[in-house]
Amino acid sequence: YLKELESHGYNSPWGLSELEKVYDRGCRSPFLYFRAWSLIKKQESLLRKLSPFLIRVLLFAQKEGVITESILLRTAFLSANVKRFYPTLYKILCEGYEKYGKKEILEAICRHIMNDNPVSPAYFKWYEKAVEEDIRLTRLYEYYIETRPEESDAPVPMAVKLYFSYNTSIGERKRAYLYSKIIGEKEKDPISFENYEKIAGDFAAAGLKNGRINEYYAVLYREFYPEIKDAETAGYMAEILFTHKLTCSDPKMRRVIICHPALREMQAYVLKEGVAYPKIYSKNACVFFEDEKKRRFAATVEYKIEQLLDVDRHAKSCMLFGIWDTAMQLYCCHEKTWQLDIGKKNLMNFWKAAENLYFTREYRDKTRKQLLEYFNSHADEWTLVPFAESIKEITYGHIDKPATFEMLIQFKQYKKAFNLINRMGYEGISPQLLLKLAVTAIKLKSYDEDEELLDLSYHIYRNGFFNDDILEYISRNGLSSLEETEKIWNDMTNFVMDTFEIEEKYLLRSMFTGKTTGEAEKIFENYSRKGGKPKVRMAYLIFLSMLHVLKGRKISDFTADRLKEVCKNKDNESRFCALSWIKYMAENPEKISEGDEELIKSILEKFSREKIRLEFFKKLPAKIIKGFSLDDKVFAEESARSGSAVVIHYKIDSANNISDQWKDEPLKESVEGLFVREFLLFFGETLSYYCTVTTAEDVYDTPVRKLSIEESDTKGRTRYQLINRMLMQMSLGAKEETEETMKKYMWQEAFADSMFKIIE
């Protein structure tokens, strides 16, 4: 076919196009490529464009080693018109450059790879050669920087430096890389550094503001921010200060997990090409790795951590400008208990950390504990007052209530301290501190009544810590038991305080409860001597009289004197006062004067008319009770609530006759609350009795009591006494004494009969 074409005088271009048609139909024969190469070699002008067929032809020629330098240069020139990347063309150009080293071919290579992935690290060697050859090609320097290995120690070419001193068309990471290299070379090339100083400084400022950080940004920050000079910069620096570079050698790992024991949540960072930039705030952080299947590893993975910034220096600057974020708090406060050491410089960090919810509850509690210890050991520092004023007393109280209370008292936060003990109680708190709080609160309230303050005052007092303010407050506003009121009165007396008010309270409460204490009459005496209210004094005097008469309580000489005055004063006459005074005189007959005898007789005469006869009347001197017929009587007495129904059950036994039958009889209420029944007994007889008392609420029986004639009732000259004496002597077998007593009895009987006849 070709021969036929030759016979018709065809030209070579037409023949090359015919060969390309054969290629397009699928022919890949080496003979086809050889024929095409023969035509091109014979006439180079036939190579006008680089079609896929011609690229194949050139590749064939190159493999066969027959391609010429001129063809390669023409190929390099024509490659500028190729708009897509051909690996075969790239191979042709690369091998052609290696063989001939022509600048035109190198430029063609760089231009052609820009049609592929121009930032592939594999192409850096061509960009590097092009820069060295000073080739002018659009975006050559950008791709040079983008593909340059970051671990390279080679200096940045001057042309690149000059280009980027006015052009910023590369990405932020590569700009940071370039600027860091220029900073690293500033000693060798200070002029380039001067050219870049402003642009790099502005770039560093923008990066700092946006929180950018890697090893290259770190170089910029170290250069342009050796010291922090304002709060805004400190805030930005605190965001990136604790970022570290972590390099992992295991390609299966996808994420790195950082866990701080003090923080509630873990932090995860993606590993990109084995590198991550985690934030690590302390040496106690735990590092874990996670693979694509979410499995986590720790000790089995090799890694390296590098600190990017000077943490110690910048952290101090951040604190000076009041940066107290979580990272700064954890760095300054540390994580372990034994590391917690508070000082003036890091106090604010501890204070913020104690309330930071990003920390665990356990860590915050430990921090609060340390704060309390620091405050209590530096109570004299006025700079700590604002902290004490803003403290949450209940929160800190749950950690250590005594220490919290002590701190509040030392810094005069009395309101907070008062709220603390009201909410959480007094247990474990020093009474001395409670006393200080109570005294202050009392003075602030001007001794006005406050229920919570009163409870506190009583608590302190009952623990044995008090002063005159506490005594004054509880005596004014308190309501204690009689025993405690008596103790308060004694303590106030020892403090030489005015006790009039508490004495009146004691007397009124004593009457209300129906009870007294050992100092009752002494209190009554003091109250009376101070001119106490007449109604109160009279009421209490009657109360003491009732206790004396009904319950057998002893009364003092002072009380007895007051009773005597009442008995003399007919206007204030009181039955119980008279009975009590009579009983006192019966118990103390040696104190009866002549004037008293007449008063006693008049009172007894009045009681006789009212049919009031009691056992203690018999103890009065015989000359006083003579004529009242009391010698031959015994009295069964029972005290009960006035108005009760009282029934006596009794029997009389003798030495020869023991009775089993009980007699019942209602008892008469002689005076309010006292029920009495008179019995006539002789020597040797025993009266046994008990009473059934019926009140509105209850019915009960009293214990069995026994009464008998005492030996004293056998002495005297009355008929009753003579009979009892004879019975006693007979029981003892004293016949002579019995006969003698009988003679006296008969003589008295005869004398009495004769006297009655004379009267008749």
Image (cartoon, rainbow, N blue to C red):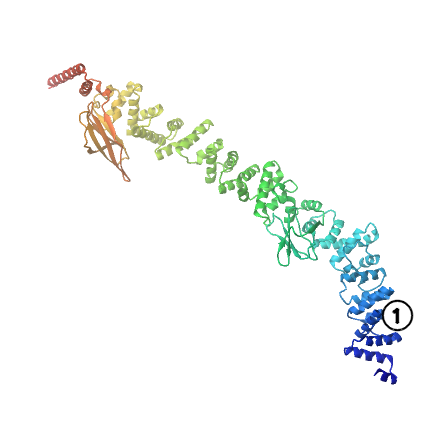
**Residue 300 locus on image (x, y percent):** 65, 52
Q: Nearer the viewer, residue 668 or 320?
A: 320
Q: Secondary structure under badge 1?
A: helix
- Which residue: 27% across, 35% down? 642
Q: Nearer the viewer, residue 711 or 603?
A: 711
Q: In the picture shown, does residue 645 fall above or below 519?
A: below
Q: Quadrant of residue 53?
A: bottom right
Could you tell me which quadrant the C terminus lies in?
A: top left
Side of 232 relative to 14 (left or right)? left
Q: Quadrant of residue 127?
A: bottom right
Q: Quadrant of residue 149?
A: bottom right
Q: In the picture shown, does residue 222 fall above or below 429?
A: below
**Residue 441 locus on image (x, y percent):** 51, 37
**Residue 116 locus on image (x, y percent):** 76, 67
Q: Is residue 574 visible?
A: no
Count the labels in the image.
1
Q: Is residue 703 visible?
A: yes
- Which residue: 46% across, 34% down? 473
Residue annotated with mark 1: 70
Side of 487 relative to 190 (left or right)? left
**Residue 565 locus on image (x, y percent):** 32, 25
Side of 324 relative to 16 (left or right)? left
Q: Nearer the viewer, residue 459 or 92?
A: 92
Q: Residues within 10 Å of mark 1 (few under 14, many from 20)?
A: few
Q: Kindly identify the amino acid type of the residue bearing the numbered disc 1.
A: Ser
